Image (tube, grey):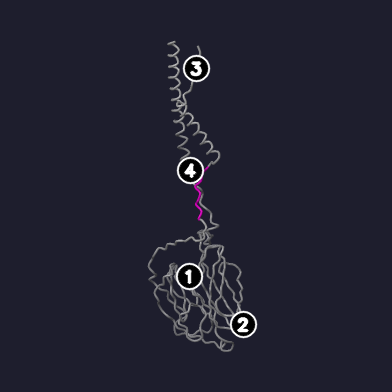
Amino acid sequence: MTNHFRINSRAALPSILGLCLLVFLVAIIFARPAHAITQIQTPAPQPGSYGLEATKPQPPPTVGATVATPGSGGAASSSPTTVTGICPKGLLVEVYDNNVLTGSVMCNDGTFSLQITLFVGNNDITAIDYDDLGQAGPATNTNTITYNNAHFTSFGTLITLTSSYGRRSAAAGTELDWPLQLSGGNGPYAFSIDWGDGTKAELKSQSISGVVDLSHVYTKAGIYQTSVTVTDVNGVSAFLQLVSVASGQVNGSTGAATSDKSSTTAPPKVEWIPAAVSVVLLIPTFWFGRQSQLISLRKKMERDREAYGGE
């Protein structure tokens, strides 16, 4: 008498599922040992797309910048001259002479100091501080000084170099543009620009007065003091100090900075928990499947024994 055993496909299903799960986990472990959470990249702007920018509102500065020197009522013997004063720390200070922007500087330690070119005759010097949103603080004092120099009478008119912006910014690694306004003097004009980042001074020439377009690429993010000197054909000069900002991720250990493109990402986080849970669940799944198969085989054998015994 020969016993024929047939394995019920329904009884073998748990074992097959457990085996498939085991193969799947082994493939994941050896093919991808550590699945990291990948940082989502910011897509490049597409034609016709729109960008949104949010700004957190804040009240304007309540304390204004004050001019300390030169004192009001004095006379200057040379130009450019140094203007100093007190200011709220961390704000931008713009200095105006006869309501014309003649320079800007950051207030880092509660004081400011910069050089400005004077006008011939009376000079009404004021300072105004601005926060990061461009909100102005209250106006304070105005110091008036006199400047007379026979050099301008002999060789021509005074040169005025100014800008509509006391501060300009661009992302590190991209071009920062500085539009200036040049008037007076006699061309051609020679420019020397110190961008404040340790690079060699840039030389530029222009034949006539008017708009002067400057540009520079900062390789590291930070705040830089930009100094521009212009001299005309007769040797008459003008001087302008401005604040350039290269945005990006600042390196706090050195005070230098790196741009967003060169900044390193954080170490990846590995998803071990799902894999561990799957391995733990695999053991009881395989065991229950095996038990179910044994029970099915035992019942089959009993039915076959009864069937053959009854013949």
Assign the magenta stretch its main secondary structure: loop
Q: Position of residue 58 (x, y in %)?
A: 38, 66
Residue that numbered label 4 is attached to: 271
- Is 227 within the magenta? no
Give the mark nearer the N terminus: 2 vs 4.
2
> Magenta residues?
34-42
Residue that numbered label 1 is attached to: 106
Q: How would you rate the neighbour count of disc 1 (Cα within 10 Å): few for under 14, some for 14-19, many for 20 or more?
A: many
Q: Position of residue 192 (x, y in %)?
A: 59, 74
Residue that numbered label 3 is attached to: 4
Q: Nearer the viewer, mark 3 or mark 2?
A: 3
Indicate left or right for 154 with 305 as reference.
right
Which residue sits at x=57%, y=87%? 156
Query: Secondary structure under badge 2?
Result: loop
Query: Gap between marks 3 and 2, in whole Å?
Result: 113 Å
Q: Nearer the viewer, mark 1 or mark 4?
A: 4
Give the amino acid at mark 3: His
Q: Nearer the viewer, mark 3 or mark 1?
A: 3
Query: Gap between marks 1 and 4, in whole Å?
Result: 46 Å
Give the mark nearer the N terminus: 3 vs 1.
3
Query: Gap between marks 3 and 1, in whole Å?
Result: 94 Å
Residue that numbered label 2 is attached to: 233
Q: How would you rate the neighbour count of disc 2 (Cα within 10 Å): few for under 14, some for 14-19, many for 20 or more?
A: some
Give the amino acid at mark 4: Glu
